[in-house]
Image (spheres, rainbow, N blue to C red):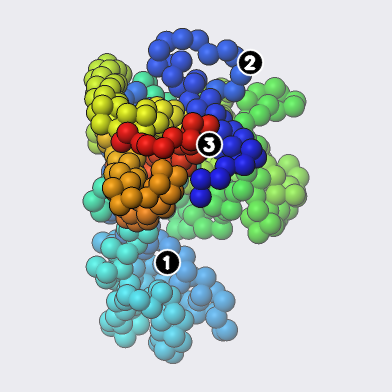
Amino acid sequence: MLEFPTWRKVWLWGITLVAVAASLPTIFNAANIRWPAQLPDPMVNLGLDLAGGSHILLEADAQQVQTQRVQNMEDAVQAAFRSAEPRIRIGDVSTRGGRLTFMVNSAADVDRAREEILPLINGSGLVREWNLEVVDETRFVLTQTQAGADAALNSAMDAATDVVRKRIDALGTREPTIIRQGDNRIVVQVPGLDDPEQLKELLGKTAKLEFKLVDPEFQQALPDETAHEITKVGTQVVPYAEGSGQEGSSMVVRRLGGIQGDSLIEATAGKDQQSNEDVVNIKFDAQGGARFAKLSSENVGRRFAIILDGAIISAPNFNEPIYGGQAQISGNFTFDSAAALAIQLQSGALPVDLKIVEERTVGPDLGADSIKKGLIAIMVGLFAVIALMVATYGRFGLYSTYALILNIGMLLGIMAIGNTTLTLPGIAGFVITIGAAVDANVLINERIAEERKRGRRVVAAVENGYKEASRAIYDANITNFIAGVLLFLFGSGPVRGFAVVLIVGLFTSVFTAVTLTRMWVAGWLRRARPTELVI
Protein backbone atom coordinates (compact mmCIF):
# COMPACT_ATOMS: atom_id res chain seq x y z
CA MET A 1 0.00 0.00 0.00
CA LEU A 2 2.98 2.29 0.55
CA GLU A 3 4.63 1.32 -2.72
CA PHE A 4 4.75 4.22 -5.18
CA PRO A 5 6.58 3.40 -8.44
CA THR A 6 8.02 6.27 -10.45
CA TRP A 7 5.25 6.26 -13.07
CA ARG A 8 2.63 6.65 -10.36
CA LYS A 9 4.47 9.56 -8.75
CA VAL A 10 4.73 11.30 -12.12
CA TRP A 11 1.03 10.72 -12.75
CA LEU A 12 -0.06 12.07 -9.35
CA TRP A 13 2.20 15.10 -9.52
CA GLY A 14 1.09 15.76 -13.10
CA ILE A 15 -2.59 15.85 -12.10
CA THR A 16 -1.79 18.09 -9.14
CA LEU A 17 0.34 20.59 -11.04
CA VAL A 18 -2.08 20.86 -13.99
CA ALA A 19 -4.99 21.59 -11.65
CA VAL A 20 -2.98 24.09 -9.61
CA ALA A 21 -1.68 25.80 -12.77
CA ALA A 22 -5.27 26.21 -13.98
CA SER A 23 -6.00 28.24 -10.85
CA LEU A 24 -3.28 30.82 -11.54
CA PRO A 25 -5.30 33.06 -13.94
CA THR A 26 -8.04 33.36 -11.32
CA ILE A 27 -5.52 34.13 -8.59
CA PHE A 28 -3.77 36.71 -10.78
CA ASN A 29 -7.11 38.33 -11.61
CA ALA A 30 -8.09 38.50 -7.93
CA ALA A 31 -4.76 40.17 -7.16
CA ASN A 32 -5.20 42.63 -10.10
CA ILE A 33 -2.12 41.22 -11.81
CA ARG A 34 -2.26 40.95 -15.60
CA TRP A 35 -2.15 37.40 -16.90
CA PRO A 36 -0.05 36.92 -20.08
CA ALA A 37 -2.32 36.97 -23.11
CA GLN A 38 -0.30 34.23 -24.81
CA LEU A 39 -1.21 31.67 -22.14
CA PRO A 40 -4.53 29.87 -21.63
CA ASP A 41 -6.72 31.66 -19.11
CA PRO A 42 -9.41 29.43 -17.58
CA MET A 43 -11.30 31.54 -15.07
CA VAL A 44 -13.71 31.00 -12.23
CA ASN A 45 -16.77 33.12 -12.99
CA LEU A 46 -18.38 35.23 -10.30
CA GLY A 47 -22.08 34.97 -9.60
CA LEU A 48 -24.58 37.82 -9.41
CA ASP A 49 -24.02 38.29 -5.67
CA LEU A 50 -20.27 38.77 -6.20
CA ALA A 51 -19.86 40.32 -9.66
CA GLY A 52 -23.10 42.29 -9.76
CA GLY A 53 -25.35 42.16 -12.79
CA SER A 54 -28.98 42.33 -13.85
CA HIS A 55 -32.04 40.90 -12.15
CA ILE A 56 -35.32 40.79 -14.07
CA LEU A 57 -38.67 39.31 -13.11
CA LEU A 58 -40.90 38.36 -16.07
CA GLU A 59 -44.63 37.69 -15.87
CA ALA A 60 -46.83 35.91 -18.39
CA ASP A 61 -50.44 36.73 -19.19
CA ALA A 62 -52.42 33.61 -18.34
CA GLN A 63 -55.45 34.95 -20.23
CA GLN A 64 -53.40 35.08 -23.43
CA VAL A 65 -52.65 31.36 -23.13
CA GLN A 66 -56.37 30.61 -22.90
CA THR A 67 -57.15 32.86 -25.86
CA GLN A 68 -54.49 31.17 -27.94
CA ARG A 69 -55.88 27.76 -27.03
CA VAL A 70 -59.31 28.78 -28.28
CA GLN A 71 -57.83 30.01 -31.56
CA ASN A 72 -55.84 26.80 -31.96
CA MET A 73 -58.98 24.77 -31.32
CA GLU A 74 -60.85 26.77 -33.95
CA ASP A 75 -58.10 26.04 -36.50
CA ALA A 76 -58.13 22.34 -35.58
CA VAL A 77 -61.92 22.11 -35.86
CA GLN A 78 -61.94 23.92 -39.20
CA ALA A 79 -59.21 21.61 -40.56
CA ALA A 80 -61.02 18.48 -39.33
CA PHE A 81 -64.32 19.55 -40.90
CA ARG A 82 -62.65 20.42 -44.22
CA SER A 83 -61.04 17.00 -44.44
CA ALA A 84 -64.25 15.16 -43.54
CA GLU A 85 -66.02 13.28 -46.35
CA PRO A 86 -68.35 14.88 -47.18
CA ARG A 87 -67.20 18.23 -45.84
CA ILE A 88 -68.95 19.53 -42.72
CA ARG A 89 -69.93 23.16 -43.15
CA ILE A 90 -70.32 25.48 -40.17
CA GLY A 91 -71.10 29.11 -39.56
CA ASP A 92 -71.63 31.77 -36.87
CA VAL A 93 -68.18 31.00 -35.39
CA SER A 94 -67.30 32.89 -32.21
CA THR A 95 -64.31 32.79 -29.85
CA ARG A 96 -65.56 35.37 -27.37
CA GLY A 97 -65.53 34.74 -23.65
CA GLY A 98 -62.74 32.19 -23.78
CA ARG A 99 -64.83 29.55 -25.49
CA LEU A 100 -65.46 28.38 -29.04
CA THR A 101 -69.00 28.29 -30.40
CA PHE A 102 -70.24 27.52 -33.90
CA MET A 103 -73.33 26.26 -35.66
CA VAL A 104 -73.42 23.22 -37.95
CA ASN A 105 -75.27 24.21 -41.13
CA SER A 106 -77.03 20.87 -41.53
CA ALA A 107 -78.66 19.04 -38.62
CA ALA A 108 -77.79 15.76 -40.34
CA ASP A 109 -74.07 16.51 -39.77
CA VAL A 110 -74.34 16.99 -35.99
CA ASP A 111 -73.35 13.43 -35.09
CA ARG A 112 -70.47 13.42 -37.59
CA ALA A 113 -69.27 16.76 -36.26
CA ARG A 114 -69.27 15.40 -32.71
CA GLU A 115 -67.20 12.39 -33.78
CA GLU A 116 -64.66 14.68 -35.47
CA ILE A 117 -64.38 16.90 -32.39
CA LEU A 118 -64.06 14.25 -29.68
CA PRO A 119 -60.41 13.31 -30.53
CA LEU A 120 -59.50 17.01 -30.44
CA ILE A 121 -60.89 17.78 -26.98
CA ASN A 122 -59.50 14.77 -25.12
CA GLY A 123 -55.89 15.97 -25.39
CA SER A 124 -53.36 13.62 -23.85
CA GLY A 125 -56.06 11.72 -22.00
CA LEU A 126 -54.51 12.51 -18.58
CA VAL A 127 -56.88 15.40 -17.92
CA ARG A 128 -60.08 16.52 -19.56
CA GLU A 129 -59.10 19.75 -21.34
CA TRP A 130 -62.42 20.76 -22.92
CA ASN A 131 -66.11 20.40 -22.20
CA LEU A 132 -68.41 19.88 -25.18
CA GLU A 133 -72.08 20.87 -25.25
CA VAL A 134 -74.62 20.87 -28.07
CA VAL A 135 -77.39 23.43 -27.58
CA ASP A 136 -80.32 24.34 -29.78
CA GLU A 137 -79.70 21.05 -31.64
CA THR A 138 -76.99 22.39 -33.99
CA ARG A 139 -74.88 24.83 -31.93
CA PHE A 140 -71.63 23.43 -30.47
CA VAL A 141 -70.04 25.06 -27.41
CA LEU A 142 -66.45 24.15 -26.45
CA THR A 143 -65.36 25.42 -23.03
CA GLN A 144 -61.93 25.04 -21.48
CA THR A 145 -61.74 23.12 -18.20
CA GLN A 146 -59.69 24.52 -15.33
CA ALA A 147 -57.41 21.47 -15.42
CA GLY A 148 -56.83 21.98 -19.13
CA ALA A 149 -56.13 25.70 -18.68
CA ASP A 150 -53.66 24.98 -15.85
CA ALA A 151 -51.87 22.31 -17.88
CA ALA A 152 -51.64 24.65 -20.88
CA LEU A 153 -50.21 27.47 -18.74
CA ASN A 154 -47.66 25.14 -17.16
CA SER A 155 -46.58 23.86 -20.56
CA ALA A 156 -46.33 27.40 -21.94
CA MET A 157 -44.22 28.56 -18.99
CA ASP A 158 -41.84 25.59 -19.34
CA ALA A 159 -41.43 26.37 -23.04
CA ALA A 160 -40.99 30.10 -22.31
CA THR A 161 -38.26 29.32 -19.77
CA ASP A 162 -36.37 27.28 -22.38
CA VAL A 163 -36.67 30.09 -24.94
CA VAL A 164 -35.44 32.68 -22.43
CA ARG A 165 -32.47 30.46 -21.62
CA LYS A 166 -31.56 30.07 -25.30
CA ARG A 167 -31.71 33.81 -25.88
CA ILE A 168 -29.51 34.60 -22.91
CA ASP A 169 -27.02 31.88 -23.85
CA ALA A 170 -26.76 33.50 -27.29
CA LEU A 171 -25.46 36.66 -25.58
CA GLY A 172 -22.42 34.72 -24.41
CA THR A 173 -23.18 35.24 -20.71
CA ARG A 174 -21.91 32.74 -18.19
CA GLU A 175 -24.00 30.84 -15.67
CA PRO A 176 -27.23 32.86 -15.73
CA THR A 177 -29.94 31.90 -13.26
CA ILE A 178 -33.27 31.27 -14.99
CA ILE A 179 -35.97 29.72 -12.83
CA ARG A 180 -39.75 29.70 -12.66
CA GLN A 181 -41.43 31.48 -9.78
CA GLY A 182 -45.04 30.65 -9.04
CA ASP A 183 -47.45 29.78 -11.83
CA ASN A 184 -46.66 32.51 -14.35
CA ARG A 185 -43.36 34.19 -13.49
CA ILE A 186 -39.72 33.68 -14.47
CA VAL A 187 -36.72 35.04 -12.58
CA VAL A 188 -33.69 35.95 -14.70
CA GLN A 189 -30.33 36.84 -13.14
CA VAL A 190 -27.33 37.53 -15.38
CA PRO A 191 -24.00 38.08 -13.58
CA GLY A 192 -21.64 40.71 -14.95
CA LEU A 193 -24.28 42.46 -17.08
CA ASP A 194 -24.35 46.04 -15.84
CA ASP A 195 -26.71 47.45 -18.49
CA PRO A 196 -30.02 45.56 -18.55
CA GLU A 197 -31.36 47.36 -21.63
CA GLN A 198 -30.00 44.80 -24.10
CA LEU A 199 -31.39 42.00 -21.97
CA LYS A 200 -34.78 43.69 -21.68
CA GLU A 201 -34.92 44.23 -25.42
CA LEU A 202 -34.09 40.60 -26.05
CA LEU A 203 -36.58 39.17 -23.57
CA GLY A 204 -39.36 41.67 -24.10
CA LYS A 205 -40.22 40.45 -27.59
CA THR A 206 -42.22 37.34 -28.23
CA ALA A 207 -40.61 36.88 -31.69
CA LYS A 208 -43.70 35.25 -33.13
CA LEU A 209 -43.10 35.29 -36.88
CA GLU A 210 -45.89 34.87 -39.43
CA PHE A 211 -46.17 35.06 -43.20
CA LYS A 212 -49.69 35.96 -44.33
CA LEU A 213 -51.12 36.82 -47.72
CA VAL A 214 -52.40 40.35 -48.21
CA ASP A 215 -56.08 40.39 -49.16
CA PRO A 216 -56.19 40.83 -52.97
CA GLU A 217 -58.84 43.57 -52.70
CA PHE A 218 -56.55 45.75 -50.57
CA GLN A 219 -52.98 45.47 -51.84
CA GLN A 220 -51.82 48.81 -50.44
CA ALA A 221 -51.33 50.09 -46.93
CA LEU A 222 -54.32 51.99 -45.53
CA PRO A 223 -54.80 54.34 -42.58
CA ASP A 224 -55.66 52.38 -39.45
CA GLU A 225 -59.24 53.69 -39.26
CA THR A 226 -59.96 52.91 -42.91
CA ALA A 227 -58.49 49.42 -42.66
CA HIS A 228 -60.72 48.54 -39.72
CA GLU A 229 -63.80 49.82 -41.51
CA ILE A 230 -63.35 47.64 -44.60
CA THR A 231 -62.33 44.39 -42.89
CA LYS A 232 -64.47 41.38 -43.74
CA VAL A 233 -64.96 37.80 -42.63
CA GLY A 234 -61.77 35.75 -42.99
CA THR A 235 -59.46 38.77 -42.85
CA GLN A 236 -57.74 40.76 -40.14
CA VAL A 237 -56.14 44.16 -39.86
CA VAL A 238 -52.44 44.19 -38.95
CA PRO A 239 -50.65 47.49 -38.22
CA TYR A 240 -47.16 48.32 -39.42
CA ALA A 241 -44.37 48.10 -36.85
CA GLU A 242 -42.51 51.11 -35.53
CA GLY A 243 -39.46 51.87 -37.62
CA SER A 244 -40.98 50.29 -40.72
CA GLY A 245 -41.57 53.68 -42.36
CA GLN A 246 -45.33 52.99 -42.52
CA GLU A 247 -46.30 53.85 -38.94
CA GLY A 248 -49.95 54.72 -38.52
CA SER A 249 -51.06 52.52 -41.41
CA SER A 250 -52.22 48.93 -41.65
CA MET A 251 -52.83 46.18 -44.15
CA VAL A 252 -55.70 43.74 -44.50
CA VAL A 253 -54.42 40.15 -44.56
CA ARG A 254 -55.97 36.72 -44.77
CA ARG A 255 -56.46 35.35 -41.27
CA LEU A 256 -55.90 31.71 -42.21
CA GLY A 257 -53.66 29.96 -44.70
CA GLY A 258 -50.34 31.60 -43.86
CA ILE A 259 -47.14 30.10 -42.46
CA GLN A 260 -45.97 30.26 -38.87
CA GLY A 261 -42.33 30.74 -37.98
CA ASP A 262 -42.24 27.69 -35.72
CA SER A 263 -40.63 25.64 -38.51
CA LEU A 264 -37.54 27.87 -38.66
CA ILE A 265 -34.27 26.04 -38.09
CA GLU A 266 -31.82 28.88 -38.71
CA ALA A 267 -31.78 32.66 -38.56
CA THR A 268 -28.69 34.82 -39.12
CA ALA A 269 -28.02 38.50 -39.63
CA GLY A 270 -26.53 39.43 -43.00
CA LYS A 271 -26.40 41.89 -45.91
CA ASP A 272 -28.55 41.98 -49.00
CA GLN A 273 -26.19 41.48 -51.95
CA GLN A 274 -28.04 43.97 -54.16
CA SER A 275 -29.10 46.77 -51.81
CA ASN A 276 -26.42 46.19 -49.13
CA GLU A 277 -29.03 46.73 -46.44
CA ASP A 278 -29.05 44.75 -43.21
CA VAL A 279 -31.36 41.76 -43.39
CA VAL A 280 -32.13 38.53 -41.53
CA ASN A 281 -31.62 35.32 -43.49
CA ILE A 282 -33.93 32.50 -42.45
CA LYS A 283 -34.13 28.83 -43.27
CA PHE A 284 -37.10 26.49 -42.80
CA ASP A 285 -37.09 22.79 -42.08
CA ALA A 286 -38.19 20.42 -44.84
CA GLN A 287 -41.90 20.66 -44.00
CA GLY A 288 -41.84 24.42 -43.58
CA GLY A 289 -39.82 24.85 -46.77
CA ALA A 290 -42.37 22.82 -48.71
CA ARG A 291 -45.22 24.95 -47.36
CA PHE A 292 -43.36 28.16 -48.19
CA ALA A 293 -42.60 26.93 -51.71
CA LYS A 294 -46.26 26.02 -52.22
CA LEU A 295 -47.46 29.39 -50.90
CA SER A 296 -45.03 31.35 -53.08
CA SER A 297 -45.64 29.34 -56.24
CA GLU A 298 -49.41 29.65 -55.97
CA ASN A 299 -49.30 33.41 -55.34
CA VAL A 300 -46.68 34.81 -57.73
CA GLY A 301 -47.24 38.53 -58.14
CA ARG A 302 -49.17 38.91 -54.90
CA ARG A 303 -48.03 40.66 -51.74
CA PHE A 304 -47.49 38.90 -48.48
CA ALA A 305 -46.94 40.41 -45.06
CA ILE A 306 -44.04 39.46 -42.80
CA ILE A 307 -45.54 39.89 -39.33
CA LEU A 308 -43.47 39.95 -36.16
CA ASP A 309 -45.30 40.03 -32.84
CA GLY A 310 -48.51 41.23 -34.43
CA ALA A 311 -46.97 44.05 -36.48
CA ILE A 312 -45.86 44.14 -40.12
CA ILE A 313 -42.15 44.72 -40.64
CA SER A 314 -42.31 44.45 -44.44
CA ALA A 315 -44.76 43.43 -47.18
CA PRO A 316 -42.88 42.37 -50.35
CA ASN A 317 -44.21 40.62 -53.43
CA PHE A 318 -43.78 37.02 -54.46
CA ASN A 319 -41.92 37.82 -57.68
CA GLU A 320 -41.18 34.14 -58.28
CA PRO A 321 -41.55 30.82 -56.47
CA ILE A 322 -39.15 30.47 -53.56
CA TYR A 323 -37.72 26.98 -53.28
CA GLY A 324 -35.09 25.52 -51.00
CA GLY A 325 -36.70 26.68 -47.76
CA GLN A 326 -34.63 29.88 -47.57
CA ALA A 327 -35.91 33.45 -47.42
CA GLN A 328 -34.85 36.92 -46.41
CA ILE A 329 -36.46 39.40 -44.03
CA SER A 330 -35.85 43.09 -44.60
CA GLY A 331 -37.30 46.03 -42.74
CA ASN A 332 -35.08 49.06 -42.08
CA PHE A 333 -32.77 47.07 -39.82
CA THR A 334 -29.47 48.15 -38.35
CA PHE A 335 -26.82 45.52 -37.84
CA ASP A 336 -27.59 45.35 -34.10
CA SER A 337 -31.35 45.08 -34.59
CA ALA A 338 -30.92 42.43 -37.29
CA ALA A 339 -28.62 40.44 -35.00
CA ALA A 340 -31.08 40.75 -32.11
CA LEU A 341 -33.97 39.58 -34.29
CA ALA A 342 -31.87 36.67 -35.53
CA ILE A 343 -31.23 35.58 -31.93
CA GLN A 344 -34.93 35.82 -31.12
CA LEU A 345 -35.99 33.83 -34.16
CA GLN A 346 -33.23 31.26 -33.72
CA SER A 347 -34.22 30.63 -30.11
CA GLY A 348 -37.87 30.27 -31.06
CA ALA A 349 -40.95 32.32 -30.35
CA LEU A 350 -42.19 32.70 -26.82
CA PRO A 351 -45.46 30.79 -26.45
CA VAL A 352 -46.80 33.63 -24.33
CA ASP A 353 -45.94 37.31 -24.00
CA LEU A 354 -43.71 38.15 -21.04
CA LYS A 355 -43.75 41.56 -19.44
CA ILE A 356 -41.12 42.89 -17.07
CA VAL A 357 -42.65 43.49 -13.64
CA GLU A 358 -39.42 44.01 -11.72
CA GLU A 359 -35.88 44.92 -12.66
CA ARG A 360 -32.80 45.95 -10.79
CA THR A 361 -29.09 46.20 -11.36
CA VAL A 362 -26.86 44.79 -8.66
CA GLY A 363 -23.64 46.77 -8.38
CA PRO A 364 -20.27 45.05 -7.90
CA ASP A 365 -19.43 47.00 -4.74
CA LEU A 366 -21.29 44.68 -2.40
CA GLY A 367 -19.74 41.68 -4.13
CA ALA A 368 -16.23 43.13 -3.80
CA ASP A 369 -16.79 43.61 -0.08
CA SER A 370 -18.09 40.03 0.20
CA ILE A 371 -15.04 38.70 -1.66
CA LYS A 372 -12.71 40.68 0.62
CA LYS A 373 -14.35 39.40 3.77
CA GLY A 374 -14.53 35.89 2.34
CA LEU A 375 -10.80 35.91 1.60
CA ILE A 376 -10.12 37.11 5.14
CA ALA A 377 -12.22 34.25 6.49
CA ILE A 378 -10.38 31.77 4.26
CA MET A 379 -6.94 33.03 5.32
CA VAL A 380 -7.83 33.09 9.03
CA GLY A 381 -9.25 29.59 8.81
CA LEU A 382 -6.25 28.38 6.81
CA PHE A 383 -3.65 29.68 9.28
CA ALA A 384 -5.63 28.43 12.29
CA VAL A 385 -5.87 24.93 10.83
CA ILE A 386 -2.18 24.91 9.86
CA ALA A 387 -1.10 25.99 13.33
CA LEU A 388 -3.26 23.35 14.99
CA MET A 389 -2.11 20.52 12.70
CA VAL A 390 1.61 21.33 12.99
CA ALA A 391 1.42 21.74 16.76
CA THR A 392 -0.49 18.48 17.19
CA TYR A 393 1.09 16.13 14.65
CA GLY A 394 4.54 17.54 13.86
CA ARG A 395 5.88 16.19 10.55
CA PHE A 396 2.55 14.61 9.71
CA GLY A 397 0.92 17.97 10.40
CA LEU A 398 3.28 19.56 7.87
CA TYR A 399 2.21 17.02 5.27
CA SER A 400 -1.38 17.87 6.05
CA THR A 401 -0.57 21.56 5.58
CA TYR A 402 1.01 20.98 2.17
CA ALA A 403 -2.00 18.91 1.16
CA LEU A 404 -4.37 21.64 2.33
CA ILE A 405 -2.64 24.33 0.27
CA LEU A 406 -2.62 22.13 -2.83
CA ASN A 407 -6.26 21.29 -2.16
CA ILE A 408 -7.24 24.96 -2.42
CA GLY A 409 -5.25 25.40 -5.62
CA MET A 410 -6.70 22.26 -7.19
CA LEU A 411 -10.23 23.25 -6.18
CA LEU A 412 -9.86 26.65 -7.87
CA GLY A 413 -8.21 25.09 -10.91
CA ILE A 414 -10.87 22.44 -11.49
CA MET A 415 -13.61 25.05 -11.11
CA ALA A 416 -11.80 27.23 -13.64
CA ILE A 417 -11.42 24.36 -16.11
CA GLY A 418 -15.11 23.55 -15.71
CA ASN A 419 -16.01 27.22 -16.25
CA THR A 420 -18.12 27.14 -13.09
CA THR A 421 -19.44 30.10 -11.15
CA LEU A 422 -18.44 31.15 -7.64
CA THR A 423 -21.21 32.63 -5.51
CA LEU A 424 -21.26 33.99 -1.98
CA PRO A 425 -22.38 30.60 -0.59
CA GLY A 426 -19.54 29.15 -2.67
CA ILE A 427 -17.08 31.18 -0.58
CA ALA A 428 -18.70 29.65 2.49
CA GLY A 429 -18.12 26.29 0.83
CA PHE A 430 -14.43 27.15 0.53
CA VAL A 431 -14.20 27.92 4.23
CA ILE A 432 -15.98 24.66 5.09
CA THR A 433 -13.67 22.77 2.74
CA ILE A 434 -10.60 24.13 4.53
CA GLY A 435 -11.99 23.10 7.90
CA ALA A 436 -13.10 19.67 6.73
CA ALA A 437 -10.12 18.93 4.45
CA VAL A 438 -7.87 17.97 7.33
CA ASP A 439 -10.48 15.66 8.88
CA ALA A 440 -9.08 12.83 6.80
CA ASN A 441 -5.55 13.53 8.06
CA VAL A 442 -6.77 13.67 11.65
CA LEU A 443 -8.39 10.25 11.23
CA ILE A 444 -5.27 8.83 9.59
CA ASN A 445 -2.85 10.28 12.15
CA GLU A 446 -4.91 9.14 15.11
CA ARG A 447 -5.24 5.69 13.60
CA ILE A 448 -1.48 5.48 13.11
CA ALA A 449 -0.98 6.51 16.74
CA GLU A 450 -3.34 3.74 17.86
CA GLU A 451 -1.49 1.17 15.77
CA ARG A 452 1.80 2.20 17.40
CA LYS A 453 0.26 1.86 20.86
CA ARG A 454 -0.71 -1.69 19.93
CA GLY A 455 2.94 -2.44 19.31
CA ARG A 456 3.10 -2.45 15.52
CA ARG A 457 6.30 -1.33 13.86
CA VAL A 458 6.50 2.06 12.17
CA VAL A 459 5.90 0.92 8.58
CA ALA A 460 3.13 -1.50 9.59
CA ALA A 461 1.48 1.16 11.76
CA VAL A 462 1.50 3.71 8.93
CA GLU A 463 0.23 1.20 6.37
CA ASN A 464 -2.60 -0.04 8.60
CA GLY A 465 -3.42 3.51 9.68
CA TYR A 466 -4.00 4.62 6.10
CA LYS A 467 -5.84 1.41 5.22
CA GLU A 468 -8.27 1.42 8.13
CA ALA A 469 -8.89 5.18 8.17
CA SER A 470 -9.56 5.27 4.44
CA ARG A 471 -12.73 3.23 4.88
CA ALA A 472 -14.26 5.77 7.23
CA ILE A 473 -13.04 8.64 5.06
CA TYR A 474 -14.65 7.23 1.91
CA ASP A 475 -17.93 6.46 3.70
CA ALA A 476 -18.17 9.97 5.12
CA ASN A 477 -17.38 11.62 1.77
CA ILE A 478 -19.89 9.45 -0.12
CA THR A 479 -22.70 10.71 2.10
CA ASN A 480 -21.51 14.29 1.63
CA PHE A 481 -21.30 13.71 -2.12
CA ILE A 482 -24.91 12.51 -2.22
CA ALA A 483 -26.02 15.61 -0.31
CA GLY A 484 -24.07 17.83 -2.70
CA VAL A 485 -25.57 16.20 -5.79
CA LEU A 486 -29.09 16.65 -4.38
CA LEU A 487 -28.37 20.32 -3.68
CA PHE A 488 -27.10 20.76 -7.23
CA LEU A 489 -30.06 18.98 -8.85
CA PHE A 490 -32.85 20.59 -6.85
CA GLY A 491 -31.27 23.89 -5.91
CA SER A 492 -30.77 26.97 -8.04
CA GLY A 493 -28.47 29.98 -8.27
CA PRO A 494 -26.34 30.43 -5.13
CA VAL A 495 -27.41 27.04 -3.72
CA ARG A 496 -25.99 25.30 -6.79
CA GLY A 497 -22.84 27.40 -6.42
CA PHE A 498 -22.39 26.06 -2.91
CA ALA A 499 -23.03 22.51 -4.15
CA VAL A 500 -20.35 22.84 -6.87
CA VAL A 501 -17.69 23.91 -4.36
CA LEU A 502 -18.77 21.14 -1.98
CA ILE A 503 -18.66 18.38 -4.60
CA VAL A 504 -15.35 19.43 -6.18
CA GLY A 505 -13.89 20.01 -2.72
CA LEU A 506 -14.71 16.45 -1.70
CA PHE A 507 -12.66 14.99 -4.55
CA THR A 508 -9.71 17.33 -4.12
CA SER A 509 -9.70 16.87 -0.34
CA VAL A 510 -9.60 13.08 -0.54
CA PHE A 511 -6.98 13.19 -3.30
CA THR A 512 -4.64 15.53 -1.45
CA ALA A 513 -5.26 14.41 2.14
CA VAL A 514 -5.09 10.67 1.46
CA THR A 515 -3.27 9.95 -1.80
CA LEU A 516 -0.65 12.71 -1.82
CA THR A 517 0.18 12.55 1.88
CA ARG A 518 0.53 8.77 1.64
CA MET A 519 3.01 9.25 -1.22
CA TRP A 520 5.00 11.76 0.82
CA VAL A 521 4.99 9.62 3.95
CA ALA A 522 6.06 6.56 1.95
CA GLY A 523 8.98 8.50 0.47
CA TRP A 524 10.07 9.72 3.90
CA LEU A 525 9.88 6.22 5.37
CA ARG A 526 12.10 4.82 2.61
CA ARG A 527 14.64 7.62 3.00
CA ALA A 528 14.79 8.02 6.80
CA ARG A 529 13.77 4.50 7.91
CA PRO A 530 12.69 5.82 11.35
CA THR A 531 12.35 3.49 14.31
CA GLU A 532 9.96 5.80 16.16
CA LEU A 533 7.16 8.20 15.25
CA VAL A 534 6.36 11.47 17.01
CA ILE A 535 2.66 11.83 16.32
* Quadrant of res 57: top left
Confirm whether residue 365 shows in the render: yes
Mark earlier in primary sequence (1, 2): 2
* Quadrant of res 319: top right
To which residue does mark 2 refer? 38
To which residue does mark 3 refer? 526
Mark earlier in primary sequence (3, 1): 1
Q: Residue furthest top?
A: 33
Give the secondary structure at mark 1.
helix
- Residue 422 lies, in percent from the top left, at 37, 31
292 relative position to 12: left or right: right
To which residue does mark 1 refer? 74
Mark earlier in primary sequence (2, 3): 2
- Vertically, is 178 above or below 374? below
Give the secondary structure at mark 2.
loop
User: Foreground mark, 1 or 2?
Assistant: 2
